[in-house]
Amino acid sequence: MKRKALLRHLRQSGCYLKREGSAHSLWMNPLTGAVETVPRHSEISDKLAKKICKGLGIPEAKKWNNSEKDEELFTLTRSPSGPIIEAAELNQYNQNNIR
């Protein structure tokens, strides 16, 4: 799992960065008071990510594959006018405005 994806999951679960160490970052869950270290590697093993989430008392981070990520990003794209639009609407918008 990419470190960025894990940090995004921690933030979405309500955790925040407590402080930076020399080789690790300390993240805290304000609801439980639990603190876990997150290494500064670009790739974090799924086993370690699971351990970090369990230690913070949050749900396990979902491992994204590219098709799921693309689909979700596509579905949750905002139109220029603001509201969230579905993928089919986005395709239509792009076809009409890219020309």
Image (tube, rainbow, N blue to C red):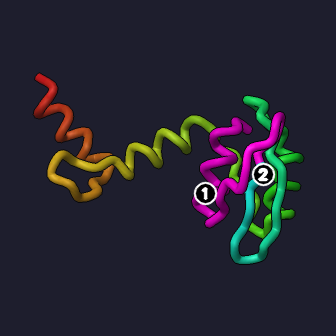
The residue singled out by tag 2 in the image is 26
Dot 1 lies on which element?
helix
- Residue, x 29% and y 57% (percent of image)? 84
In the image, 16 versus 8, the foreground residue is: 16
Report how far apart the C-alphas of labels 2 and 1 lie in the structure.
13 Å
* Residue 55 at x, y percent in the picture: 86, 63
> Which residue sits furthest top?
99
In the picture, the quarter occupied by the C terminus is: top left
The x and y percentages for residue 36 are 83, 56
Bin the neighbour count of mark 1 within 10 Å (Cα to Cα): few under 14, some 14-19, many 20 and up.
Answer: some
Is 88 a magenta residue? Answer: no
As drawn, is 95 to the left or to the right of 86?
left
**Given the image, on which type of amino acid does mark 2 rest?**
Leu
Residue at which label 1 appears = 11
Q: Is residue 14 left or right of residue 61?
A: left
Q: Which region of the structure is painted magenta?
A: 1-25
Q: For residue 19: magenta?
A: yes
Query: Quadrant of the rendered structure where residue 65 is?
Result: top right
Label 2 neighbourhood size at 10 Å, few (<14), some (14-19), many (20+)?
A: some
